[in-house]
Image (cartoon, rainbow, N blue to C red):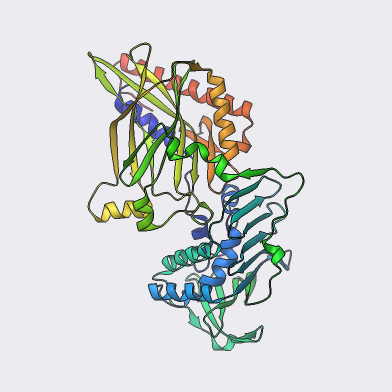
Amino acid sequence: MNQEDLQEQLDRLGRAVAPGPSVAQNVLRRIGQLGPGRVGRTRRILMKATIGVAACIAIALGAWVVLGTATPSLYAQAVKAIEQARTVHAVGKRLQDGKMVKMMEAFYERGVGMAEYDYSEKHPFFRIDDGKYCWRRSGNGPLVQSKSEDPAGIVKKVVRATTRLLEGEENARREPAGDRAIDGAVCKQYVVLRSDGRFRALIWIDQKDRLRRFEKQQPKADDWETYQTVTVEYDVRIDRSRFQVKIPPAATVVNAEQVLAGFALEKAIFKKELMGLIFAVHDLQRCDNGMIFIVCSTRPCPAVIREFGPIRSHTDGSAVYGDFQLDGSWKRVDGKERYYQPIRLANLYHDGMYVQWELLHPLGAWPQPMETCELSAYVYARGKLQEKYTQAGQNWYKRFGPLAELPLPGQAVPFGEVVGKIHADALALEPLDGQAWVIEASRQGPDGQWTTRYRRPSELPPHQFAEEVQGELEHLEQFRQQQAQRRAAGGKPGG
């Protein structure tokens, strides 16, 4: 297998469940662009951590910007409305079996905190941020405790995202006939109609330019049917118990800082700033089957955070300012090739950090015993950082190699122990905001194409994950042998 073959295989290995747009963006985009429709199972899982804030508080404080072109002044006005409101109470309802049922609720009190509740029967969820700690729980899963994420700041950030998304949208149509009083406040009605006529939104704004009511409608016969609503109250009394966490006796409490401690930069084996990102190595082990186990990450450097702002998984989903792919570190020594075959077994997206758990399979003429790990990587800028490089006429990705030569531990670790640790680590990280994935062995579809998928750690018990890893290794070995046979026969290597 030459370097070209290896890169082809790496590209195939890299095709997984692609992270979608941020959850907040998905929800907010539906305000004026999408009609009713079912969300796929995977998307529902990814949305569950943020739909409360995005659909209640975000819409409540930011959706009114559809009434004009999004500008910095509009954003400033939205933020001012947040700062001036003492409290906000938002309720979201959805049509079910002919009735409007309360599905979510959000509370915000300046200087006290924020709370959101999703009342879904299948996937109930709550998040409470009291300014000191943030607590969240999905269903009967673990209760996750982390540092406060600035309750007002969360709302402001989603409003900022709203103004960006709505920039250039057509203005809403004023509809005086729909004006009404809501909780004693005189409100003006605006209508946003999708171009194909399959969806419209009714928006009521009070005299302080604050959203009071939002309705999503779909055509039914010769009329419109309301299938989702958000109503908002301002400066009302809120029961302070809404911001207090009651820990169920059987609940497991997960401390986010402790779970993420293994990725602290001060503990990294190696770290280097590359293209505005900090690339770090957190674990490096010699396996008893001859492979190398390595855990690496990228995250934005302080200057990038200052320029573009931090990324938070609860509003930005799997967004990152950059990521990476380990390279095979191919070289020719004394006329003989040697390289690694990187095999990604798990990954994590969390608050702008991207982590990979990988195996490096040494192939070719490596010195024995191997004393060091020669590290090379492709680093990719994403999002705003990628835009910055592109606008400057610079490449937004680059290969760095040799990046480092790291000493391998003298003691080999049992391979089964390594696989078990990967699953345990990913499972511990799954309750956090963000996305943790583990590999499912490649499958060949009816079209003959091989696809590598990644699943939630909780969907694969440890023994099944071990079987999937073994299956992937066997598939890759079979692929390598087929390539060698083609070369020996004088044919062109293929996938």
x, y percent for residue 52: 61, 60
Image quarter hosting the N terminus = top left
Residue at the spot x=36%, y=11% of the render?
A: 368
Residue at the spot x=63%, y=37% of the render?
A: 459
Residue at the spot x=35%, y=45% of the render?
A: 277
**Which corner quadrant of the image does residue 233 belong to?**
bottom right
Q: How many marks?
A: 0
**Which corner quadrant of the image does residue 111 belong to?**
bottom right
- Residue closest to the far top: 368
Residue at the spot x=56%, y=20% of the render?
A: 416
x, y percent for residue 58: 54, 66
Comparing 73 with 26, the one in front is 73
Comparing 464 with 280, the one in front is 280
Whether residue 220 appears in this view of the structure is: no
Whether residue 149 appears in this view of the structure is: yes
Q: Is residue 443 above or below residue 83?
A: above
Comparing 374 with 39, the one in front is 374
- Residue closest to the far right: 249
Q: Is residue 380 above or below residue 367?
A: below
Image quarter hosting the C terminus = top left
x, y percent for residue 332: 25, 19
Left/right of residue 299 with respect to residue 30 in the rendered view: left
Q: Is residue 474 above or below residue 456?
A: above
Left/right of residue 37 with respect to residue 393 in the rendered view: right
Left/right of residue 237 with respect to residue 173 in the rendered view: right
x, y percent for residue 195: 47, 71
